Amino acid sequence: MEKEKSRYNDDELNEFKQLILTKLDISKKEFKTIQTNLKDGSENGSDGTNNNYLTLDDGADTFEKENLNHLAAHQLKFIKNLEAALVRIENKTYGVCKTSGKLIPKERLRAVPHTTETIEAKLKR
């Protein structure tokens, strides 16, 4: 009877590392774009010297800024999760479910490379 794998080998970890580095690069670029849009929105905002008919426009600007702030926070969290996954690769613990200790399937890791749990473990929460 073949023993069940307890971790991914170095070649497999390197494959995941390349995937994560690519996603990290894209995510950091998207984060910079969001930051630029936030900054540009602040600089181009209303200075209060216009007439009162722009109140609806101000509400739209506020909504847009809140939405961009939410996107920025979400993107930053994703970046931190990807960076944590790189640390797990270096420690050779990447792909091991933190709840069950089982190996997370490759398909799941390719879809959600920063995950720390199998689907089964996540659904039990």
Image (cartoon, rainbow, N blue to C red):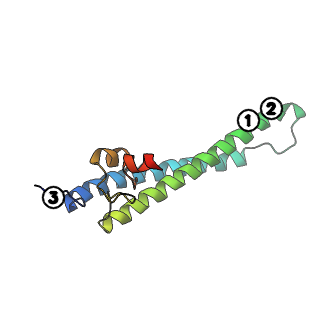
Residue at 74% in and 41% down:
62
Residue at 73% in and 35% down:
60
Disc 1 versus disc 3: nearer the observer: 3
Q: Amino acid at mark 2?
A: Leu
Which percent across, then down, holds residue 9?
20, 60
Label 2 near label 1: C-beta < 8 Å? yes
Disc 3 from disc 2: Cα separation: 65 Å
Disc 1 from disc 2: Cα separation: 6 Å
Q: Disc 1 marks which residue? A: 60
Q: Is residue 121 left or right of residue 30?
A: left
Residue at 53% in and 55% down:
76
Instruction: Residue 37: tell me if it is visible.
Output: no
Which percent across, then down, holds residue 85?
38, 59
Q: Which residue is at the front of the view, 47 or 94?
A: 94
Q: How many marks?
A: 3
Q: Residues within 10 Å of mark 2 (few under 14, many from 20)?
A: few
Which percent across, then down, holds residue 73?
58, 52
Q: Which residue is at the front of the view, 2 or 28?
A: 2
Q: Residues within 10 Å of mark 1 (few under 14, many from 20)?
A: few
Q: Disc 2 marks which residue? A: 56
Instruction: Residue 78: tell me if it is visible.
Output: yes
- The N terminus: image quadrant: bottom left
Q: Amino acid at mark 3?
A: Lys
Q: Residues within 10 Å of mark 3 (few under 14, many from 20)?
A: few
Quarter of the figure with residue 8? bottom left
Q: Disc 3 marks which residue? A: 3
Q: Is 90 located above or below residue 40 in the figure?
A: below
